[in-house]
Image (cartoon, helix red, strand yellow):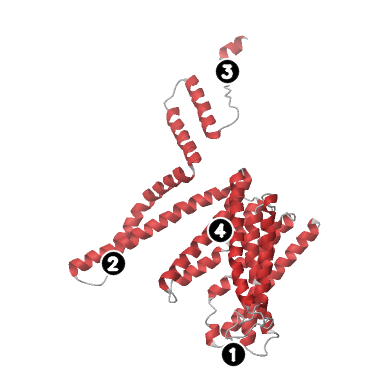
Amino acid sequence: MSGRVASWLAWSLSMLCVAMFLAIVALYVLIRSAPQVPSSVSTTFALTDLLIGVPFLAFPLVGAVIASRRPYNLIGWICLAVGSLFLLLGVSEYYSIYGVANPGSVAFPIGVAWLGNWLWMPAVGLFATYLFMLFPDGRLLSRRWRPLAWLSGAVIVVLSVGFGLAPGPVASLPGKIRNPFGLEGFPWLSDGANFGFPLLALCILASVVSLVLRYRRSRDEEREQIKWIAFAASVVALLFLISLIILLIYGSKPPSWTRLLDTMTALSYTGVPIAVGFAVLKYRLYDIDIIINRTLVYGSLTAMLALVYFGGVTATQAIFRTLTGQEQQPQLAIVVSTLVIAALFNPLRRRIQSFIDRRFYRKKYDARMTLEGFSARLRDETNLGALSDELVGVVRETMQPVHVSLWLRPDPPPRGSETQE
């Protein structure tokens, strides 16, 4: 495929994905506002459900940029495929729910809903296996990983066919509308599809292991590329883990503030295609170290200051209740906690920054400390020979070059000697 054809195909697919996203927005408005749709159905669609489409719109847009500039790299095409499948899944779900709730309004709502029974499997499979397995250059780590690629594809195909032909109700539709393409005489298809999940999980784990091994063997640019996707994936995993813990604690009745966390978790998926774009196109590649450093520093600082604030308010309230017997929280507790946080911000930030630099950026931290020590000695040193040796030693220790030499320009002759000559 020529570069022009690849660019045309990539941008055409991305524009199709934009059209599907706009269709999802239109169907979302219809479901929420149409009087024919039962309230039990329309109220289940929150804004979070619509925001889930934002990261899956980012996948094809980033994929189009990569595929148009690097048509030989499969990562761009994988991003396009993942975004297209997820957006098509969203359109089919919203379309079928609106059609079932409003009989006769649209054509073939149950048949379109059947797409949602199996379409999510290739979308998840491509994202969770091949994106990590082939990142960042679109090639396997070595020929030994070819069986994993074939096994992952076979598992995805078998699970997709199993879910598509399994008898039973359609998952995306309210009520108990059965799968129109389900093979009622083969009930084992439902159980067989579920048995394939452990094998798919092993393929996902093996793909992540291949990315870890690629990172251990990589150097320079490729290592920075892997840091981008690892950072984005870790943010998604952390927010998902927090949501899971809250779900286990509160059960089916979580507090209202968890909707904000759900929205943040949904939007965090947007960071994955953006990180892939920065990594593959190598745009501002080395900024990932600064991003990781700042995230560790300010994430830890925010958590510690929040703990100090709520701990201070709680402790002050308990002391005030013990001394006065009143239940009302005094405003003094909030004022004192705020002043304590303001006083602790800069000292705590410096200590956290120093700890993270020592623990995770040891080489850079040692180089910085060496330069600071040399600057202090530079102010006091008067011997030019000793200063030259010290400078060469600092450059050798911090930069680690193959060869170091220092050339000093000789002093110019006095002006009187030039006149005599």
Asked whether the beta carbons under mark 2 and mark 1 sit within 8 Å of each other, the answer is no
Closer to viewer: mark 2 or mark 1? 1
Closer to viewer: mark 4 or mark 3? 4
**Residue drawn 18% across the image and 69% down it:** 324
Q: Name the residue under label 1.
A: 36
Asked whether the beta carbons under mark 2 and mark 3 sit within 8 Å of each other, the answer is no
Report, in whole angstroms, how far the alpha carbon at label 2 lies from the one at label 4. Answer: 41 Å
Query: Which numbered circle lies on residue 412?
Result: 3
Q: Name the residue under label 2.
A: 331
**Residue drawn 62% across the image and 72% down it:** 193
Which of the 4 image quadrants contains residue 232?
bottom right
Tell me the element at label 1.
Answer: loop
Report, in whole angstroms, how far the alpha carbon at label 1 lies from the one at label 4. Answer: 41 Å
Q: Where is residue 249 in the image (x, y as percent from the top left)?
A: 41, 70
Q: Where is residue 298 in the image (x, y as percent from the top left)?
A: 45, 54
Q: Where is residue 4 in the image (x, y as percent from the top left)?
A: 80, 58
Q: Along the polypeptide, which appears first: circle 2 or circle 3?
A: 2
Badge 4 density bin: few <14, some 14–19, many ≥20, Cα 10 Å: some
Q: Along the polypeptide, which appears first: circle 1 or circle 3?
A: 1
**Residue drawn 46% across the image and 64% down it:** 242
Q: Mark 4 points at which residue?
A: 233
Tell me the element at label 3.
Answer: loop
Q: Residue furthest top?
A: 420
Query: Which numbered circle lies on residue 53?
Result: none
